[in-house]
Image (cartoon, rainbow, N blue to C red):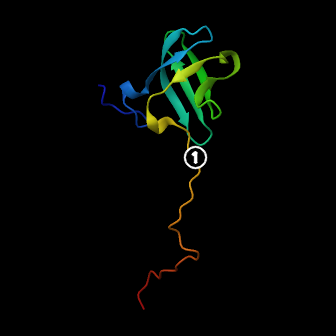
Amino acid sequence: MSNVNNKLGLTEAERTVYYYTATNEKKLAEIRQYDPTYGFVVLHDPMLNTQIDFFWDSGTSTWKGTGIHSGYTVDISIEELAPLTKQIDEDVPETATTVSRFPA
């Protein structure tokens, strides 16, 4: 069953992560939502049955908890789960090329 992917395309082992509370307790959670554009991830703690929101702090390169969970951090070891950075494609021509669907 560990090869089953969810909507994020992650296996059960990949979406299982550890987070740390403000008192540095290590706890287990599951990734439920991930938005790489805004740098936002939502975890579900099955033991507490709670949802914990984290945002990406680019200054410290860590995921930090929000609201009542401020002071929480999460360890995500999957490299694809880093927020997206803007990239400029140099291989794009200056003008668009029109292609006719009907041959002349």
Residue drawn at x 57%, y 58% is 88
Given the current orientation, which residue lies at the most extreme bottom position? 104
Of residue 9 and residue 20, the one placed in the foreground of this image is 20
Neighbours of disc 1 within 10 Å: few (<14), some (14-19), many (20+)? few
Residue drawn at x 36%, y 30% is 11
Relative image position of residue 81 (x, y in whole percent): 49, 35
Residue drawn at x 59%, y 43% is 37
In the image, residue 92 above or below residue 35: below
Of residue 101 and residue 29, the one placed in the foreground of this image is 29
Residue type at tag 1: Thr
Relative image position of residue 23 (x, y in whole percent): 61, 7
Of residue 99 and residue 64, the one placed in the foreground of this image is 64
Given the current orientation, which residue lies at the most extreme front position? 60
Residue drawn at x 54%, y 8% is 25
Question: Could you tell whether 9 is left or right of 89 in the image?
Answer: left
Asked where in the image residue 34 lies, by quadrant, the reply is top right
Which image quarter is the N terminus in?
Answer: top left
Of residue 96 and residue 60, the one placed in the foreground of this image is 60
Asked where in the image residue 40 lies, by quadrant, the reply is top right
Q: Label 1 belongs to which residue? A: 85
In the image, residue 70 above or below residue 9: above
Given the current orientation, which residue lies at the most extreme right position? 67
Which image quarter is the C terminus in?
Answer: bottom left
Relative image position of residue 54 (x, y in whole percent): 61, 26
In the image, residue 100 above or below residue 6: below
Q: What element carries label 1?
A: loop
